[in-house]
Image (tube, rainbow, N blue to C red):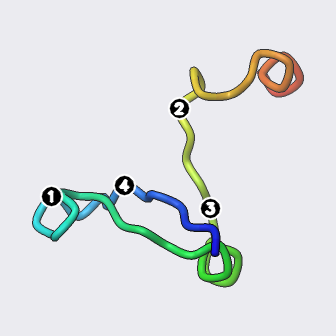
Amino acid sequence: KKYYVIKNSWGEGNLYHGYLYMSEAYVRLKTVAILVHKDAIPKKIAKKIF
């Protein structure tokens, strides 16, 4: 299975110090929006959206 490491906005009070592991299936089913820092977007894609 593929898992994603997700930063938890609720703080660091969990087993993984503020991060969660979510399966790809769960992310596909439950995700409404994703926030990504603009520096993490590849330059080729950033040129199209900024």
- Determine the secondary structure under disc 2: loop
Q: Residues within 10 Å of mark 1 (few under 14, many from 20)?
A: few
> What amino acid type should be assigned to the residue bearing mark 1?
Glu
Sequence-wise, the earlier of marks 1 and 2 is 1
In three-dimensional space, the C-alpha distance between marks 4 and 2, rounded to whole angstroms, equals 13 Å
Q: Mark 4 highlights which residue?
A: 7
Relative depth, front residue between 8 and 17: 17
Sequence-wise, the earlier of marks 4 and 2 is 4
- Determine the secondary structure under disc 1: loop
Q: Picture coordinates of residue 19 (x, y %)?
A: 31, 59
- Determine the secondary structure under disc 3: loop
19 relative to 36 in the view: left or right: left
Figure check: 17 above or below 30: above
- Determine the secondary structure under disc 4: strand
Q: Mark 3 highlights which residue?
A: 33
* Quadrant (top left/top right/bottom left/bottom right) for the N terminus: bottom right
> What amino acid type should be assigned to the residue bearing mark 2?
His
Q: Residues within 10 Å of mark 3 (few under 14, many from 20)?
A: few
Q: Mark 1 highlights which residue?
A: 12
Relative depth, front residue between 3 and 46: 3
Sequence-wise, the earlier of marks 3 and 4 is 4
In three-dimensional space, the C-alpha distance between marks 1 and 2, rounded to whole angstroms, equals 20 Å
Sequence-wise, the earlier of marks 3 and 1 is 1
Sequence-wise, the earlier of marks 1 and 4 is 4
Q: Picture coordinates of residue 38 (x, y %)?
A: 59, 26
Give the label, 3 or 1, closer to the camera.
Answer: 1
> What amino acid type should be assigned to the residue bearing mark 4?
Lys
Q: Mark 2 highlights which residue?
A: 37
